[in-house]
Amino acid sequence: MKRILLVFLLCFLFLPGLGAQELGEKAEPFVLVPLAAEMLPADRLMLAISAKNYPVTPGDIYRLTFLLAGKPVSNEILVESDYTLNLNIFGKVNSENMSFSELKPRVEKIISDAYPRSLPSLNIVLVGNFQVLIKGEIPQTSFVTAWGLSRLSEIVQGHIGPYSSIREIGIISKDGRLKKYDLFKALHLGIIEEDPYIMQGDTVIIYRRDKAVEINGEIYRPGRYQLLKNEGLIELIDLYGGGFTKLADTSRIKLDRLAVERPRTFYFDFTRDLPPSFELEDGDVLAIPAKSANLPVVIFEGAVVSPAAGAAAEPDGGEIGFERYNRITHLFIEGESLFDALLAIRESIAPSADLSKAYVIREGSVQPIPVNLQKLLYAYTPSADMALQPFDRIIIPTHRSYSSRIPVSGAVYDPGSYAFTPGKNYSYYVDLAGGIDPEMNTDNRVSITDSQGKIRGLDEIIKPGDRIFVHTNNFVYNFNRHFPIITTGIAFITTIIIIIDLLAR
């Protein structure tokens, strides 16, 4: 019973979402797993037993049990292709257009009438399958396996093409009658009659869609929808999109018409009287902007980094020394203070930022306004805060002593300056420089000095402004390096002595 309830729950959860998007080029709107293909036979059996409307289906196998002279008798009965049940000595029963809940008491009455007090019971043992032909505006005509509780939405799932309609799907019954259904109404509006059960002998025909349009932005149900011929802009927003959200800016609604020879854009202002009837065309895209799109901004400049791009972000402005000069914008809401804006961009403040020397440049103000962001951020007091105005520029300078690159020189393969990385020791930067050259350094002797020239320990973390020097102390290297100079000097001195001696003679 728990498994049956779980199956029903999943069906009710997923069915309404099937119509949220159009069956078109951009997305597969059907998210329901095809029951006939995925459900285990035992699961289908339990679902059929619990469903009052399970139709008698060719291929079903039922078990009939009753007492005969006090002894139990059991027979298995197959539902034949013409819906006939052969009850042997009790005759045949035609079960066409009957549900199992209707068939069961009828068969049990036949047995009771023949054998009073025989306690007959008819139960489902196995449910039958059958094939349904699906054709029309689909990639390929196919036969789909179905069973007694397969609905139309399940049958067409996975067979819808880019131009298939879900607003007009026909079912031809085995007696030749055609009836059309609208799956949008079934799956989106909850009109279940538009998503009927499929019967043996049915043929499903999918017609070509009329027009499909897209709506996105500040709407409750964004997506791609198929509209009927008499439906336009108002129906798209209210019926399909579910109406505007509270964040929608209805004064500048944009419609792009792309599927024409010369694409065009239209704008609508719903804050005034509703626009006159506007006919939509296939491929139209309606965008509902958010109110925040029209909000002013304040700008943080200097020692800030875009959170999306990270350290690899390209600078918006120039470059000061080794430090990137960036700009990031923050949406301004009337009444917002500097402290609130600073908290919003806190993760974007660069390690090199000198928060204590920040200042604000305001339109119409001659002099910059000094602000101590260090005090404001870490020791907040109302007196250190200030009210912002639209388009204020908050400039965060870089520490003068800060260098974003660490020089590595001496006995390394590739001496130079390397980007500062917080938390690393000297060996990290030596490795970036190619490592120590053993021909120049035999004992890995390294010295580190800070920006003031003071010696720092090798076990300390490298800080901005530090310099790393790998000493050249290999005797053979130094001998080979200086021996030619010494030899040349000795030869020169010897030559001078010889000349002086000759002149003295």
Image (cartoon, rainbow, N blue to C red):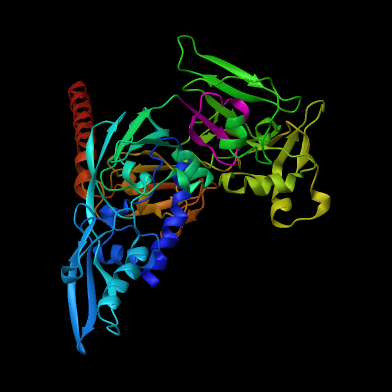
**Picture coordinates of residue 75, whole percent (x, y):** 17, 74
Of residue 196 and residue 224, the one placed in the foreground of this image is 196
Q: How many labels does the image show?
A: 0
Most extreme residue toward the top, as rendered?
Answer: 262
Viewed as shown, does residue 362 lie left or right of 253? right
* Image quarter of the C terminus: top left
Using the rendered view, name the quadrant where residue 458 is placed: bottom left
Q: Which residue is drawn at 63% across and 29% down?
A: 234
The structure residue drawn at horizontal position 35% and vertical position 59%, both measured from the top left corner, is 99
| Residue 502 is inside the magenta segment | no
Q: In this view, does 280 lie above or below 146?
A: above
Image position of 424 with respect to 233: above or below: below
Q: Does 41 sit above or below residue 338? A: below
Q: Where is residue 168 in the image (x, y as percent from the top left)?
A: 42, 32
| Residue 83 percent across, percent down from the top left | 24, 55
Quarter of the image that includes the N terminus: bottom left
219 drawn magenta = yes
Question: Is residue 432 shown to the viewer in this render?
Answer: yes
- Considering only vertical position in the picture, is 276 above or below 236? above
| Viewer-nearest residue: 116 or 476 | 116
Q: Which residue lies furthest to the bottom in this view?
A: 70
Specify whether 18 is left or right of 66. right
In the image, which residues are magenta?
211-234
Residue 249 is left or right of residue 402, and the answer is: right
Q: In this rendered view, identify the residue nearer to me: 193 or 102.
A: 102
Image coordinates for residue 111, horizontal then vertical, percent: 26, 75
Q: Can residue 404 be seen in this view?
A: no
